[in-house]
Image: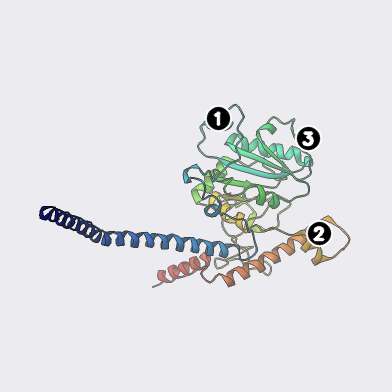
Amino acid sequence: MKPLKSWRWLMRKRNAFSDGGKCGLKMRQLPFLGVVCTVALFFVYRITNYQHRQTEMDGELHRFNTVKEYHLESRFLHGLPHGIIQGRSDLELRPLWSRSSSRSKVNGFSNHNLLAMPVGIKQKHNVDAIVQKFLPENFTIILFHYDGNMDGWWDLDWSNKAIHIVAQNQTKWWFAKRFLHPDVVSIYDYIFIWDEDLGVEHFNPGRYLDIVKTEGLEISQPALDPNSTDIHHRITIRARTKKFHRRVYDRRGSVKCSDSSEGPPCTGFVEGMAPVFSRSAWHCTWHLIQLSNPEDLAKKHGASAFDVRTEIRRQSTWELQTFKERWNQAVEKDKNWVDPFKRGKTYRIRKQQNRFV
């Protein structure tokens, strides 16, 4: 019986050593697991904190009751693999039977530009002249038909190459806000948003863009012929001895334009009839175009006798006032915002002072 007892005692002892070994292994794993858990918790904290900050940033962007539905890809697209998301588009026509744009690699052009115009059938002849100038320079053409008449354009050779959008009695900026989103026009180097009645007899789009690129102009317009009849601001007149100008010098009347002038009508001014935006400039400008509520306008002016020109002036005045109020409110509430133009002004003043030291 003793041998059997000894055998059982040895087995229990062996199992004890075996369990002790496992416990020792677990004891050695605990510090490693602690490090792993700490790292995991750190990453969870960073991700949660990042998401919280993004939510706060979204709130900052939308707290002025502008557009609630903004870029929420991080919130609504989390169910898609990142590489499958196509966040941008363009305005290039693509036939059903072709894999590429109908205009791609036309005449060897590497750049793409866009001409967008609100048009009515009464200006068909002039619009035709404008488009004929731009098509050879590899421009995409988009026409906003504010009079509802699109059928009257199909007899033009280039009409089927243009994009046509119809909405009656809408303005150029109404169309631009809704159909020229920066993500849609991101492939275009420059965006021309012109009126339909501009004369282009002496205008060359290619030469104009050469000047714009060379001088680094973000927002510009072609200068007007000095003999033009509808000139409202002297800064828009073409200088006879210069390729371009950013300011005008004028001491007539109550406005004195000099080197110290910092705003319209002396400098920093482009008319709304023929603006040209770089890609980055349009990205900023698009976000400044405000949505107007016609009901608010009607309440503000009451039920007066309807006159188109009078109502247009009223609406323009009201929208400018609204924009100024929104701007002042935004600047007041955004404590982290720094005016880049004032910062540039301070730099220029210091640079001028250093010249005299």
Q: Quadrant of residue 209?
A: top right
Q: Which residue is mark 2?
A: 311
Look at discs 1 and 2 and give the one toward the viewer.
1
On-image quarter of the C terminus: bottom left
Q: Residue 127 in the image: x percent, y percent?
A: 71, 40
* Disc 3: CA contacts within 10 A as few (<14), some (14-19) or many (>=20): few
**Amino acid at the residue labelled 3:** Gly
Circle nearer the viewer, 1 or 3: 1
Marks 1/2: CA–CA distance:
48 Å
Task: Give SS at disc 2.
Answer: helix
Q: Residue at x 51, y 47 (%)?
A: 213
Q: Is residue 205 left or right of residue 156?
A: left
Foreground of the two, 155 or 236: 155
Of pointers 3 and 2, the one earlier in the residue sequence: 3
Q: Amino acid at mark 1?
A: Arg
Q: Which mark is residue 44?
A: none
**Alpha carbons under labels 3 and 2: distance apart:** 29 Å
Q: Residue placed at 44% from the left, 59% from the top?
A: 47
Give the colouring mode of the picture: rainbow
Figure check: 136 above or below 217: above
Which quadrant of the view contains residue 310? bottom right
Q: Residue at x 66, y 58 (%)?
A: 234
Write down the residue under mark 1: 99
Task: Please name whichever residue, 340 or 329, is drawn nearer the observer in this view of the structure.
Answer: 329
Q: Is residue 292 left or right of residue 26?
A: right
Residue 150 place in picture, x, y as percent: 76, 37
| Residue beneath disc 3 | 152
Above or below residue 328? Residue 169 is above
